[in-house]
Amino acid sequence: MISELSIKISSDKETPASFEIEELNDFFSDKTVDDLLQWGHNTFGNEIVAGTAFGSSGLVILHRLFELGLPIKVFCLDTNLLFNETYSLWKKIEKQFGIEIETVSPILTLTGQSALIGDSLWSKDADKCCHLRKVLPLKKYLTNKKAWISGLRRSQSSARSKIEKIEWDAINNTYKLNPLADWSAEKVWEYIHAYKLPYNQLHDDGYPSIGCIPCTSPAQDPSNERSGRWANLEKTECGIHFRGVESRKK
Ligand code: SF4
């Protein structure tokens, strides 16, 4: 298996041919989360990073990295608008796993954003707010990276239903690994409970998906994990994973 996981790709920031990505996904279709993480490390070395917003899926990935002993750097996009519960979980995870999670910050502070563009941009132009506080900082951070790992799952929403375990992220010009692409929410929570991992207390209050305070509410539709995000808008994604606005329909 180790030699199989050494399969090489053209990883020099060049857009890969679609057949290369297809072949990789065929290969990893029946492989484990650990196999994909190990391959990511073998292939990209210290130029692969893992992003987390401390959601349930992200916790599974952080725990697998910890168990495997893979020295992959972890980062969080801190919009300065996260819940206290999220910041508190951040500290707990760092302590439990003995790691330091890198903060990726927007160029503008909230005060600076208010002064330049006006107060509460999220309530007037949420796409612009996400662009300034999430999309641009991530793009800048990934400039000198070749790949990143996310906790996306197909079962999270219609917008995410077609994601693959390995993708070319054209927004950031990197590979993107989605090791939990084929996991259900139930499987994630079974894992969290089995390993007694700390998790965001807001999950117990009806928030299956947690982002910034102004744009997160309890789930409106229990069958759609992300229905509490931008609940009063058509918007379902911040833009770091997909371009444009996706339909709310399942
Ligand atoms: S989720 Fe809301 S507050 Fe956070 S960056 Fe996007 S629009 Fe702004």
Image (cartoon, rainbow, N blue to C red):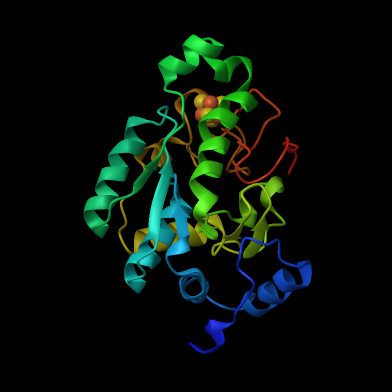
**Nearer to the camera, 125 or 136:** 136
Left or right, 198 with reference to 125: left
Q: Quadrant of the C terminus?
A: top right
**Nearer to the camera, 108 or 177:** 108
> Whole-percent x and y of residue 169?
65, 54
Location of residue 221 by image quarter? top right
**Nearer to the camera, 9 or 12:** 12
Q: Residue at 59% of width from left, 82% of height from top?
A: 7
> Whole-percent x and y of residue 140?
52, 42
> Whole-percent x and y of residue 204?
40, 40
Q: Residue at 46% of width from left, 31% of height from top?
A: 106
- Tally of numbered discs: 0
* Residue 216 visible in rendering: no
Q: Residue at 41% of width from left, 15% of height from top?
A: 111
* Residue 85 visible in rendering: yes
Q: Is residue 117 above or below residue 102?
A: above
**Nearer to the camera, 25 or 162:** 25
> Whole-percent x and y of residue 193?
36, 59
Q: Is residue 114 above or below residue 102?
A: above
Location of residue 99 by image quarter? bottom left
Left or right, 3 with reference to 174: left
Q: Residue at 42% of width from left, 44% of height from top?
A: 76
Location of residue 112 by image quarter? top left
